[in-house]
Amino acid sequence: MIPLLRYHFALLIGSHRWLPPAVLYAAYVAIGIRAGDPVLDGFGYVAAPLLPVAAWLVRAGVTAEPPAARACAAAAVGPGRAHLAAVSVAALAAAALGALGTAFTALVSDPHSADHRVAVPMGPATLAGALTALCCVLLGTAVGALANRPVVRSPGWAIPTGALAALLLLVAAGSPANAAVSGLVTGSPRGTVTVPWLPLGIAALIAAAAVAGACALSSRRT
C-alpha cells in the first residue's frame, strides 16, 4: 500500500490540482485569524472550511490519474485498493492543512474567552481544535468519495453535488461538523472547552462507510 500511496501522492502533487484549495485555505486563515483574537473562535474558524477543502482535494486526487494509468494501476493492485489510495492521499493532504491552520491559530490567538476575562487552557483547547478540524476533514472526505467517480461520473453533476453536500454538512443542525464547530464557538464566551469526541466518532464512521462504498463500487465499474 505504501508504494501506491507514494504513486498517488506524486500524481496529486504533479497535477497541481491541490494548489487552488490549498491557496484558498491559506488565504482564508491568513485573513481571518488575527493576533489576539479568542482562541476557541479561531479554532472553529479554521476548522469549518476544511470540509469543502477536503472534498475538493478528494476530487483532485481521484481525477488526477489519466484513464490509461488508472486501468494499469487497477489491474496491478485491484481497482478498490487503487481508489482507496487516491482518496487516502487527498484526506492526508487536507489533514495536513488542518494541522497547519490549527497550529497557527494556537500560536497567535489569545487563550481567553471572547470577553478576554476567562483563561482558556491551551492543551484541551488545542486538542478540541485539532479534533474539530479532523472531524471536518473526515466529513469532507466522505463527500468527496460519494460525489465523484465512481459514484458520480459526470463533472456537471459531481461538482455541484459535492459543493451542496459540503454546505449542508456545515450548516445542518444534526451534522457532526456543525456540532463540533458550534461547540467551540458557543464555548468561547464562557471560556469553556468542549472536546468533540462524539462528533468525531460519528464522522469517522460516515467517512469509513462512504469510502468503503466508493471503493467497492470502483471494483464493480472498472
Image (cartoon, rainbow, N blue to C red):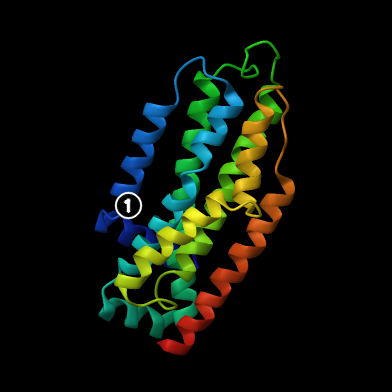
- Judging depth in this view, the residue of 32 and 132 nearest the camera is 32
Q: Is residue 19 left or right of residue 36?
A: left
Whether 32 is drawn above or below 215: the answer is above
Amino acid carrying label 1: it is Trp
* Image position, residue 52 (x, y; %): 44, 52
Instruction: Indicate the quadrant containing the C terminus: top left, top right, bottom left or bottom right.
Output: bottom left
Q: Quadrant of residue 34?
A: top left
Residue at 40 percent of width and 81 percent of height: 74
Residue at 37 percent of width and 58 percent of height: 9
Residue most extreme to the top: 117
Q: Is residue 166 left or right of residue 117?
A: left
Whether 10 is drawn above or below 127: the answer is below
Q: Is residue 124 left or right of residue 207?
A: right
- Judging depth in this view, the residue of 151 and 94 nearest the camera is 151
- Judging depth in this view, the residue of 21 and 93 nearest the camera is 21
* Image position, residue 68 (x, y; %): 26, 81
Residue at 48 percent of width and 68 percent of height: 145
Q: In this figure, what is the number of numbered marks?
A: 1
Q: Is residue 3 visible?
A: no
Q: Residues within 10 Å of mark 1 (few under 14, many from 20)?
A: many
Residue at 48 percent of width and 85 percent of height: 219
**Residue linked to disc 1:** 18
* Image position, residue 160 (x, y; %): 36, 64
Q: Is residue 15 left or right of residue 197?
A: left
Q: Is residue 37 visible?
A: yes
* Image position, residue 184 (x, y; %): 64, 34
- Judging depth in this view, the residue of 37 and 1 nearest the camera is 37
SS label for mark 1: loop
